[in-house]
Amino acid sequence: LLFLGKDKKEMEKGNCTMGNLTVEEFVLLGFLDLPKLREFLFGIFLFSYMIILAGNGLIIIITATDQTLHTPMYFFLRNLSFLEICYTSVTLPRMLMSLQTQDGTISFLSCAAQMCFLLMLGATECFLLAVMAYDRYVAICNPLRYPIIMSHKACVLLAAGSWISDIPVQIGQTSQIFSLPFCNSNKLNHFFCDIPPVLELACGDTSMNQLSVYAAALLFVTAPFLLILVSYVKIISTILKLPSATGRRKAFSTCSSHLIVVTSFFGSAIITYLWPKSSHSVDVDKFLSLFYTTVIPLFNPMVYSLRNKEVTVALKKYPVHWNLL
């Protein structure tokens, strides 16, 4: 998939030697220097992973079974929850295995696959958050036309576009990066295979790769973020014009949870992929990577459920749904 049909000889050209050894695997150093905290960190990440699976899984079940939540907003929320489960499953199980075995080795192709899925799912989340902002914009600024604009067909097309539009670009970018020679070292100072630490190990000129990373980040991170900002400027200006204080409060409550997620996710992604590396350290990169791959998916179910009255009402009816199932 990642090398688009290249034969084995062509794939081996992407490797090079360290001395007389072929680079066939990488070593993730993320937790290897913290042996005394191994059991504690394993427990923390295992608990977080279980909460992510349970919380997002519960949102998927509730929004699918409760008829009152069969609206565009909850359709996109269901997509986001499924995405978060996939996103964390790309990194957390591998991190848990490394903590349990104290072995950070990962094969060349496994590292490439992990990076590719991470990039695809990350870009999908950017698009989904932009689509959710557009949905709120139409609901608040054009309420009479909302059922027509956000029809079921339109929602399916927007969700499908978010999932598949970035796939060719991310496969191509991953293939390009892992076609580079890796001669200096095979030790990644990170928790998983991400673009910045992998490019640091590459030999030769990586300026074109860096340029493609910035171009992809502008397309898949900055552009959706700007669309979200435009949507919320219009939303806030419309809300401020509402005559009813209750209506303004309800509208702000609906949008605030989305803004919390957007600010956290895009802020960490922009610093990681667009901010100059000289302005922040490797430790900052590692912290941000844990933040957008673990912390945000962990708190998403809490933000969307505890701050949303419709979801909390549906949660109270959940035993009824379970008996019906």
Image (cartoon, helix red, strand yellow):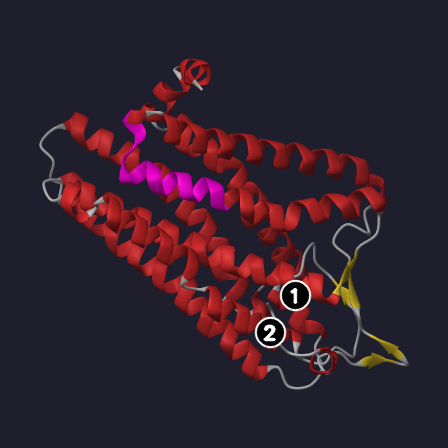
| Near-viewer residue (263 or 150) | 150
Quarter of the figure with the C terminus = top left
Q: Using residue 2 as the reference point, say whether residue 244 is left or right of it.
A: left
Q: Position of residue 90 (x, y in %)?
A: 62, 51
Q: Write the residue at 54% across / 42% down.
A: 85
The correct choice, above or below, for 268 with respect to 248 in the image is below
Give the amino acid at mark 1: Ala
SS type, badge 2: helix
Q: Is residue 70 magenta?
A: yes
Q: Earlier in the sequence, mark 1 or mark 2?
A: 1
Q: CA distance from mark 1 to mark 2?
A: 8 Å
Give the amino acid at mark 2: Ser
Contact, CB < 8 Å: mark 1 with mark 2?
Answer: yes
The span picked out in magenta is 68-83
Task: Say which mark, if any, is on residue 112.
Answer: 1
Q: Position of residue 91 (x, y in %)?
A: 64, 50
Q: Is residue 273 magenta?
A: no
User: What secondary structure do most residues of the magenta stretch adopt?
Assistant: helix
Q: Which residue corresponds to mark 2? A: 175
Q: Position of residue 236 (x, y in %)?
A: 21, 44
